[in-house]
Amino acid sequence: MNGSRFSSLAAVFAGLVFITSASAQNVSVVSGNGQVLGGNNFALQPLVVQVTDATGAPVAAGTLVNWQSSGFSGVFLLTGTNTATSATDSNGQATIVFNLPFATSAVDFTKPYVQTAVTAAVNNGTGNAATFTLTQLASAPNGSVAPQFFVNAINVPYGNVTLTGAIGGTSSPPIQLQLQATNGLATAVLPNVALVLLNYQDPALGPLVACARDSNTAVAGQNTVLTDSTGTATCTPIFGGQPGQGRFAVTVGGLGYPATASPAGFWAALDPTDPNSPQIQTALKYLPANMSVTPGAPGSIKIISPAGGTTSATSGTSNTSLTVEVDNASGQPLAGATVAWSVVSPTTGATVNASSTTTGSNGQTSTTVSFASTLNGTVRVTATVSGASPVTFTISVAPPVTIIQFQKISGDNQSAVVNSPFAQPLVVQVNSTTGVAPNVPVQFTVTGGSVSLSATTATTDSNGRAQVNVTAGSVTGAANVQASLTTNAGIGSLTFSLTVLPSAPNITAGNFVNGADQQRNSLSPCGIGALVVSAGSLGVSNISPTFPGGPVPSTNVQLTFANVGAPILDIGNNSSGQQQILFQVPCEVAPGSAVPVTLSVGGGVTNINLAVQAASPGVYQTRMSDGAFRAVLVRPDGSSVSLANPARRGEIVIAYATGLGLTAPSVGTGSVPAPGGTATVQGTVVPGIGTGGAQLVSAQLSPDLPGIYAVAFQIPSDSPTGNDVPFSIGVVPPGSSTALYSALSKIPVQ
């Protein structure tokens, strides 16, 4: 038997692909819905959808969206048909261009228009679909009157009318209009036509108005409302941006020229930094109007810096800066709000340098605080704005001292499992020329690794000690935290060394199977086993051995049976998309019903008990040309058995198995017989073909692959023939009268 006969076993250890399942995805309209072709509008603007996953986050770029039209007419520019596919961009948005004929005649004498529906759905068929309605004005049959589109203004602020309101608030009554079309023969209202408010000024510099979001936003599109069955559109204006005077347009149906043609450009969303903001769609008709927007009432005030409202300062200084942000009731930054600053305590020794300040365009404003040279203690400063609860800053003030010693007390060289707190806080000691140094700010900074701190600054207590708590992050490995003093140059810094450990692997005895046929409770000394888990659950990378049958060169996975190491032979994926770790059960392990087993992955440890049998036969298989798995066999000429090269009746073939038990002479873990020697299975090996047995020729350990046995047997002269003849291998261990069998396989016999 030579090494070439084992080449077919490479497939046994090769990695296979993962199998992933699709999750529900949501498709909503961004822009392009409700457009009207005809009149002054000669081209449709692109149709845009947003695709999000089950958590509401944008899907990855490249997700396919299927588009399909139904109704009167039209084709997608991309394909020239009524179906097309486009992919999402980095924001999870997909775009398509749809064309309608420039002119058409009505198919219904009572309607001077026709409508086409366009749907967009994700390619895997999960989740919902978004639907666009596109309208085309239609002339009367044999008529000479061009179809017209007109607006009945119910409540539209155009001309000299000025829309007024406060930032974050709405305007009442809502904007309302009715849309109709005529072709000289029939007049009818227009349903499902878009109304959009477009703004002329940058919302960072001036006011902004949009249609308030409602339950139909995902259907109509961002900042869009659609006319109902009576042709009526109702838009509740909501104001944003900055206070002041501005211009906007009430638009319907799609412009005949780009919206950016206006001198200042149009802005279409309350938040221009939002990736879900719509592209500017154009309008068939637009009605310019004015707006006057006031700052609105403050809704809240929050601390911007220092983070958390806590900081430290030195007596006699005057440059401690405090910053707050005032937001309106809708959570938007509020410009022009007056903030009052005051020192709450102590009554003397601290002064705000500006007791009243006004918020800027970002809603933020600041002041600074001065401290007397004799002040030593805690200062509290409040920031107040009318209509909101005040916020309080806490400043620890201490006189300047000369630091002579900075040292670690506890917390160094700790370990913690991912996403859990470290047992001890990081504690430092600061000593000055006068003894222990209280009220000294200590900065703590993560300089490497995945950990987070309870605070970035801690002030020493009456014993001169400062501390922070540390929590392990989601990434394993080394981490470092540096403690430093900013008030004394030259004193140096301290570094705490930490380690983030993986969580203990979540496995049971059911995860351990025979390495050849995947049977559970089928492990034995010297045999090949497999640990099978969900892909990615252990967080380990796939790796193959340098030479087939040898251990992998390096891995953070360790496995022991009764405190004896089990060689890791391969980490890959099986045919079901699961990750499997192949290993050899140590030959030194005594069989038993509860052998202690320890699995360590990157330092995370799980202990379980496993049954180890005296023998655990498993037949190695390979995928043949029809896609089915069959036993690996080698014919007398050294060729592999296949559908095109089946085994013949009467000839001696070799099958490969694991788990046949101990041999004579014995062979150690990870070893093969001595060169030129053999190691014969001690138990009784019983090959089975069809419903009967086969004559055993030999059952020996492979000379090349540890833990794998070569079983030579003769195909019976009366064996069944065909591609799927049942085949198995049984073993009766020494001292037993009961045979243990492999899972049933099959072989082709001619």
Image (spheres, rainbow, N blue to C red):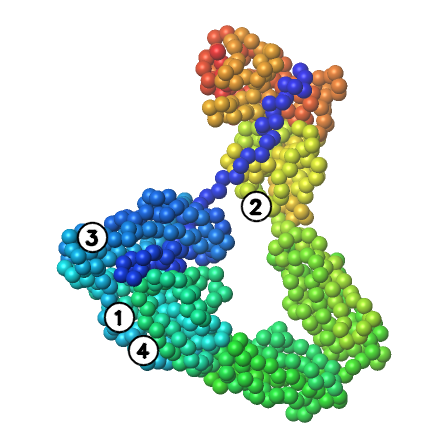
Please state which amino acid type lies under the numbered disc 4: Gly
Whether residues under marks 2 and 1 lie with C-beta atoms below 8 angstroms apart, the answer is: no
Q: In the figure, 70 relative to 111: above or below?
A: above
Q: Position of residue 698 (x, y in %)?
A: 63, 14
Q: Earlier in the sequence, mark 2 or mark 1?
A: 1
Q: Which mark is residue 105?
A: 3
For disc 4, the marked residue is 159
Secondary structure beneath disc 1?
strand
- Disc 2 to disc 1, C-alpha distance: 57 Å
Q: Earlier in the sequence, mark 4 or mark 3?
A: 3
Secondary structure beneath disc 4?
loop
Please state which amino acid type lies under the numbered disc 2: Ser
- Disc 1 to disc 3, C-alpha distance: 26 Å
Whether residues under marks 4 and 2 lie with C-beta atoms below 8 angstroms apart, the answer is: no
Q: Residue at x 69, y 29 (%)?
A: 547
Please state which amino acid type lies under the numbered disc 1: Leu
Q: Nearer the viewer, mark 1 or mark 4?
A: 4
- Apparent side of residue 675 relative to residue 618 in the rendered image (left or right): right
Q: In the figure, 688 relative to 317: above or below?
A: above
Whether residues under marks 1 and 4 lie with C-beta atoms below 8 angstroms apart, the answer is: no
Residue nearer the viewer, 667 or 200: 200
- Crowd tier of the residue under label 3, counting other residues whose Cα lies within 10 Å: few below 14, some 14–19, many 20 or above: some
Q: Position of residue 68 (x, y in %)?
A: 33, 47
Whether residues under marks 1 and 3 lie with C-beta atoms below 8 angstroms apart, the answer is: no
